[in-house]
Amino acid sequence: MDTMEAHITDIPVEKKTVVGSLSPRLVPRFKEKAIELLLQLAAFTSVAITLGIVGVLAYESFHFFQQVSVVDFLTDRQWTPLFADAHYGILPLVSGTLVTTTVALLVAIPMGSLIAIYLSEYASRPVREFVKPVLELLSAVPTVVYGYFALLFVTPALQKIWPDLPGFNMLSAGLVIGFMIVPYVSSVSEDAMRAVPVYLREGAFALGATRMQTALRVVFPSALSGITAAYVLGVSRAIGETMVVAIAAGMQPTLTLNPLEPAATMTAYIVQVSLGDLPHGSVGYQTIFATGLMLLLITLLFNIAGHALKKRYRQVY
Amino acid sequence: MRRKGLDRFFAFEGLFVMGVALLVLFALVGQLAADGAGRLSWQFLTSFPSRFPAQAGILTAWIGTLLVMLLTALTAIPLGIGAAIYLEEYAAKSWLTEVIEINIANLAGVPSIVYGLMALGLLVYELHLGQSFLTAGLTLGMLILPMVIIATREAIRSVPPAVREAAYALGATKWQTVRDHVLPYSMGGILTGIILALSRAVGETAPLITVGALSFIAFLPHPPWQETFPFVSFEWLFDPFTVMPIQMFNWVSRPQEEFHVNAAAAGLILLAMSLAMNAVAIVIRARFRKRIHW
C-alpha cells in the first residue's frame, strides 16, 4: 500500500491534475477506504466458498436426482451404482458411517471427558501445561498415518482376540478415529470446566464433598454447554473422517450394524470413485456429489444442534 | 474413608486413561519407526516412484508437498488475515457481519472431502484449472481459511483497546493503527494459527484425491524459472501433482508387504513434518506469551 502512496506523490504530472487538486487530507482518506474494501472482500470470500460448496453439490445432485428417484435413494437397501444392475440406496453407506462413528464416540467421549475432568480438577498446573499440548499431538498426526496404524497395527492386534476378524473391519477404523478425536473432546471440555468459577467448587468442598463429587455433580453439570459443544465437534469430525475408513474399513457397501464386518462409509465411497476414471457427467460421477450432499447435511445438522445446545444450556454464574 | 478411597480411585482412573491415550500415540510412532526407519535413505528421498518397491522413492511427493503448501499459504494467509482484520476492526455489528461469522463457524465444521468435491466441480470442471498444483493449492487454501481466520481474530482480540486508542490519539489512521500496532502485537497468535493450519494441510489427503491427485508421477513439474525473459515461469502451476500423503495412501493400499515398508517410511517423514510444525507453533505460543505483559 506504501507503493500506491509513493506513486501518487512521485509522479509530478498527476500532482497537477486530479490528485494534485485534491486537498492533501483526501488522499489518505481514499487509501483508507480502498484498504477497507479489500479487507471486506477478503471477509466475503468465506461466503463465496460456502456458496460454491452448496452450489456445486446442489447442481450435480439435481442432475443425479433427475435419473434416480429420491425415494429409491433413501430407501433402497443396496448401493451398487457402478454395477450393471445399478441400485442407488444410500442406506449401506449411512450405516457404515453410523457404525464407525459410534465406535469412535464410545472411545472418545468417555476418554476425553475423564481426561478433561482429571486435567481441570486434579492435575497440577505444570502437569496440565505439559499434557495438553502432548495430547493435542494426537490430532496433529496425519489421518493417512492413522489409516496405516489401523490396518497394520490395530487390526492384527484385534485378530489375536478374535481370530476370524476380517483384515478390513469397521471396529479398528472406529477405534482409531476415536483416539484421534480424544483431544478435540478433552481440550474443549477442559476449557469449559475451567471456566466454572472457583467459588462453586469451594461451596461444594465446604459442604464436605470430595473432589470427585465436586467434579461430577457441580463442575461437570455447570460446564455442560461447553462439554456438549465438544461432543458435537467430535461427532462431526468422526462422521467426516475419510482416510482411516478408506484404508482400514474396506470399501464394500454392506448394510450392517456389526462393527466386526468390513463396510464402506460415505466418505470412503467418494474416495473410491475419485480414484477410478468415471467420465464427467455420468450418473456414477454424480453419485459422489449426492453422497457429499448427504454428508454435508448430516454434519450441518450436528453443527446446528451444537450451537443450539450451547445457547440453551449457557450458564450464567 | 470409603468416599476418600473412591475419590482416589477416580483420580487414578483419570491418570490411567490419559496414559492410554499417550500410549497409543507412542505405539503409533513406534510401529511406524519399526517398519519404516530402515527404508529411509538418500536414495528414497531422491528417487521417483517405481513398480519395484526397493527402487521407489518420494522425490515427486515431497517436491509436490512443498509446492502445494506454498500455494496453500499464498491463498489462505492474505485472505485469512484480511478477513479477520475486517471482522475485528472494521465491521459494524449488522446482520451481514453476523452472517459472515456464522458462515465461518460452519465452514470450519465441513468435512474436508466436501471441499474436494466443491473443488472438483468448480475449479476442475467449471474454471478449467485442471487436476493441477494450482487446483490443489487453492483447495487446501480454502480448507484452512476458516482456521486462519478464527486464530487471527482471537489474536487480534487479545490486543487491549488502549493500544488502539493511543495510536488514534496521536493522529494515526485506522489502517496505520492496524498495520503498525495491532498486527505486530498479535503476530505471535497469528503465526501459531497459521502454522497449525498449514500442518493440518500437510497431512490432508481426501480433498486432494477427489480433485485428482496422481499417485504415480515419474517426472518433476516444470521448473519455476527459465533462461529467457521474464525468467519466471508459471507453467508448473498447471502440471499434474502428487503429495506425500497421497503417495503413502497409494503404497498402503497395495497388497504387497514390500510397499507397506515404503508407506511406513513416507509416513515417518510426514509425521516428522507435521509434528515439527506443531512443535514450532507451541514454542512460538509460549515465547510470545512470556514476552508480552499488558
Image (cartoon, coloured by chain):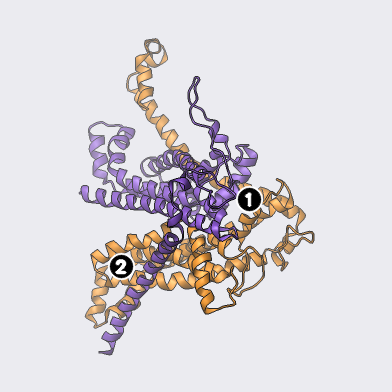
Q: Residue furthest bottom?
A: B2
The residue carrying mark 2 is A196
* SS of the residue under disc 1: helix
User: Where is residue B58 drawn, in percent x and y?
Assistant: 50, 47
Instruction: Please report the residue visible at 67 percent of the width from the left and 70 percent of the height from the top.
Output: A255
Kindly identify which chain the residue marked by label 2 belongs to.
A
Q: Residues within 10 Å of mark 2 (few under 14, many from 20)?
A: some
User: Where is residue B223 drawn, in percent x and y?
Assistant: 50, 31
Among the two numbered marks 1 and 2 on one chain, the one whose residue lies closer to the N terminus: 1
**With respect to residue B72, does B226 lie above or below?**
above
**With respect to residue A193, does A292 lie above or below?**
above
Mark yes or no: residue A222 visible.
Answer: no
The reply to whether label 1 and label 2 mark residues of one chain is: yes
Left or right: where B19 falls relative to A83: left
Indicate the quadrant containing the N terminus of chain B: top left, top right, bottom left or bottom right: bottom left
Kind of residue indicated by mark 1: Leu
Give the drawing colour for chain A: orange
Kindly identify which chain the residue marked by label 1 belongs to.
A
- Of badges 1 and 2, nearer the viewer stands 1
User: Where is residue B228 drawn, in percent x and y?
Assistant: 50, 20
The residue carrying mark 1 is A57
Q: Nearer the viewer, residue B275 or A40?
A: B275
Q: Nearer the viewer, residue A129 or B229?
A: B229
**With respect to residue B154, does A74 lie above or below?**
below
Total number of numbered labels? 2
User: Where is residue A165 drawn, in percent x and y?
Assistant: 58, 75
Could you say which chain is coloured purple in the image? B
